[in-house]
Amino acid sequence: MGQPAPIAEPPVAGGLRDRLTIPVLASGGILMAVMQTVVVPLLPDLPRLTHSTAGTVSWMVTATLLSGAVLTPVLGRAGDMYGKRRVLTAALALMTVGSVMCALSSDIVVLITARALQGAAASVVPLSISILRDELPPERRGSAVALMSSTVGIGAALGLPLAALVVQYADWHTMFWLTSVLGALGVSAVWWAVKESPVREPGRFDVAGTLGLAAGLVCLLLGVSQGGQWGWGSPRVLALFAASVAVLALWWWQQLRTERPLVDLRLVSRPRVGLSHVAALLTGFAFYANSLVTAQLVQAPKATGYGLGLSIVETGLCLLPGGVTMLLFSPVSARISASRGPRITLALGAAVIACGYAVRIADSRDLWMIILGATVVATGTTLAYSALPTLILRAVPAEQTASANGVNVLMRTIGQATSSAAVAAVLVHHTSPVGGVPVPTLHGYLLAFGTAGAVALAAGAAALTIPGDPVPGGPRRSRGRTRDTRNEALEGA
């Protein structure tokens, strides 16, 4: 059995490429989030443009969700084994190829296939965070990781109004040509500016574990994402959930008996890692309801008595302040984590998210209050999302950083998918006819906000139960910690 590669001392940034490492990786994360978001303004018109049904078109979102959930832990493990820059470049290349396919075709089967390829980009953030850990000295690592974690929200906030503008004033294929060019530039920039990490965990790739995880996650997320459309009690959905439980139970048993598993479940079962994953799932749920519900609420017709009747472009601009806030608050999150520990930062972020939803419940009629509430939620999300990878970095050996962060991002994805299903279920059961068309009531929206706020408080409670945070005011960690990370993780977890 091969031994993990020795952990080299992070180099001190000096040359142009060293100075561009953080901006290039952050731009890759933003591009990934933009790529996932740009299809949203198209969804109402795609049935007409592709000569298909609304149910079929929805698979352009579902395919990206499923492939991203499956590929994130898989590519994270591959990065730990074969090189993080190499796998990161491949993920960005697949995303770009998918964008080119969308630009060249109007066939719905091709479009769904292309969007599935783009799901590989979900691994960009965990792989980039792992590179930052390996390449940056400790004094620069915290703020860089916080920025990288925030790129998901920043890209989503930028992508929606950008895509809406393109769709409104140009042919819809233009949007994918634009993202294709950006993707090609991103691949080139990563290959030029980012060094290959010397930290590896050699071994044989766990093919059986990969197939088992893929099957279990597809069954789970397909049931969650399609439950509202197919019916939560329908035989198809119940069969998917039953199959997911059976397959994942068998996968768990196989992982515990594999010498080099895809996911180190013994590591996951340690409180510092496992509770961080639980907090990620709950935070993902709380975060996603913000943009999902806000977009629907402000676009609701004025005849509802609460809706503002905004266009998709105006809706995107409402969410833009939240993206700017995430960019500005990422260094604040890093400073709080450095002084108080990431566990406190995560709990604080969850509390801020809950406060944001309290604002939404207090007033969801005035535009300025809607923007304020959404921005407060975004601020809390920045604190929470920036703290999560730092918790993982402190709890796992360096040679398992990418795979562990990949699992953490997977938990966020499951939380977001569950949030989408829960919000849809709440709104479907609270409707009233407006012009003969059933429209969600304001009470339904407020109930969705209340649910998300309660989940945020649960995330905060989970954060406070995570053990092993450094004592405030205690001795600072030296750069020698980089070489001792593996032993510290095993002892402290």
Image: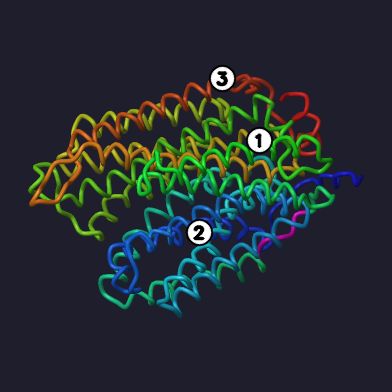
Picture coordinates of residue 64, whole percent (x, y)? 49, 58
**Of 440 and 485, the residue lying toward us:** 440
> Which part of the image, by quadrant, shows the N terminus?
top right
The residue lying at 84 percent from left, 40 percent from top is 259
Picture coordinates of residue 162, whole percent (x, y)? 34, 64
Q: How many numbered discs, if any?
A: 3
Residue extending farthest to the right is 1
Q: Badge 1 is on which residue?
A: 249
Mark nearest the camera among 1 and 2 is 1
Q: In the rendered structure, does residue 286 fall within the stretch colored magenta? A: no
In contact (CB < 8 Å): disc 2 and disc 3 = no
Q: Badge 3 is on which residue?
A: 465
Separation of residues labelled 1 and 2 (CA atoms)? 32 Å
Q: Badge 2 is on which residue?
A: 32
Mark nearest the camera among 1 and 3 is 1
User: Image quadrant of residue 242?
Assistant: top right
Label 2 secondary element: helix
- Please report whichever mark, 1 or 2, sits nearer to the chain's N-terminal start: 2
Relative to 39, residue 154 above or below: above
**Of 254 and 402, the residue lying toward us:** 254
Separation of residues labelled 2 and 3 (CA atoms)? 32 Å
Relative to 238, residue 49 above or below: below
Q: Residues within 10 Å of mark 2 (few under 14, many from 20)?
A: many
What amino acid type is highlighted by mark number 3?
Answer: Thr
What amino acid type is highlighted by mark number 2?
Answer: Met
Label 3 secondary element: loop
Picture coordinates of residue 125, whole percent (x, y)? 57, 51
Q: Is residue 289 left or right of residue 403?
A: left
- Magenta-colored span: 193-197
